[in-house]
Amino acid sequence: MNRYLDLHPEVQTALKNKQPVVALESTIISHGMPYPRNVETAKRVEQIVRENGAIPATIAVLSGRLKAGLTPDELEHLAKSGSVAKVSRRDLPYIVSGKKDGATTVASTMIIAALAGIKIFVTGGIGGVHRGAGESFDVSADLTELANTNVAVVCAGAKSILDIGSTLEVLETMGVPVYGYQTDEFPAFYTRKSGFSVDYRVENTTLLAETLKIKWELGLNGGVVIGNPIPEEHAIDEQVIKTATDTALQEADSKGIKGKEITPFLLARITELTGEKSLAANIQLVFNNAKIGAQLSVALSKIE
Ligand code: PSU
Ligand code: MN
């Protein structure tokens, strides 16, 4: 066990007994959704993971301790505080040494999940190559983490605030498999289709679990992206999202918003601009990912 890491007792017991455990991120709670919908969602996601046979381990940094598995009070604190830093790979040492609180991104959640021995991670959407990255060089550290860290990420694809085509190109270069769960197309978060193909369509979690086991037994280090489209009945009209996204991107540009601030800014603006329609969709797609992630974790634990 890493000396900076605390496992929730329930998570520790499950890992010791080789029972399925699913990691969940906390940036989505602190910087991805408004209070109190964020904490309600986080709790319901944990419940869905349980209903599908796995133990949830929400990941964050609290008073400088890396945490896998949180109490309801800790979830509430992350959702409410407003002063919790967004923590990616580069931020971890400083946040730990300063005994600060941090909400973990996909990248840092993968790091802490791997330290804990958790292989399956559920989130909403991954970070990626931002539009205009040719000039700004803004490529999320999530992609380099996916290249290196042995955790599979179940997501609803990537938001069209990003350049989805370039994001998929970078994942290919880095050798990260991109699977579509019962889909040929990489999903675009609020919508089921992005116009870009996945590498492979996979029909069930048993097959997915086998490919994960084989990848890591071959010594092919790194993560896997599993794109699980939002259920049709919760998807948002493409034109509504396109208009809101374009407006949010223009505002970010004219305000000069850059770096780690841009993703939270765009997410919050899109929520406002769509009158919370996008928030409702965001919540539903995370629920759907929690179900598939838990089933995948169960399937993997059966063959390990
Ligand atoms: N995309 C979403 N929702 C999110 C994020 C991305 O649709 O909440 C968050 C995730 O935590 C992701 C992070 O890891 O934003 C990426 O931020 P950046 O682009 O600054 O690396
Ligand atoms: Mn960035």
Image: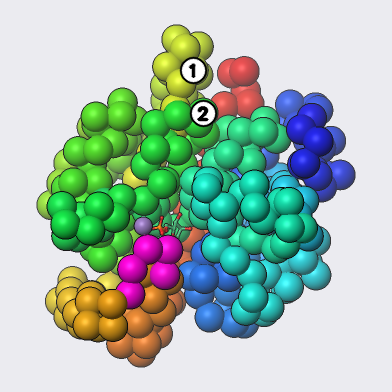
Residue 167, how many percent across, how many down? 24, 46
Q: Amino acid at mark 2?
A: Asn
What residue range appears in magenta?
A: 257-261
Residue 67, how many percent across, how many down? 74, 50
The answer to which of marks 2 and 1 sits earlier in the sequence is: 2
In the picture of the structure, the residue carrying the numbered disc 1 is 216
Report, in whole angstroms, how far the alpha carbon at label 2 lies from the one at label 1: 7 Å
Question: Callout 1: helix, strand or loop?
Answer: helix
Quadrant housing the C terminus = top right
Residue at (63, 39) in percent of width and height: 113
Residue 258 inside the magenta-drawn segment: yes
Task: Indicate left or right for 216 with 196 as reference.
Answer: right
Question: Is residue 75 placed above or below 173 in the rendered structure?
Answer: below
In the picture of the structure, the residue carrying the numbered disc 2 is 150
Quadrant housing the N terminus = top right
The reply to whether residue 294 is in sight is no
Q: Quadrant of residue 118?
A: top right
Q: How is the image coloured?
A: rainbow
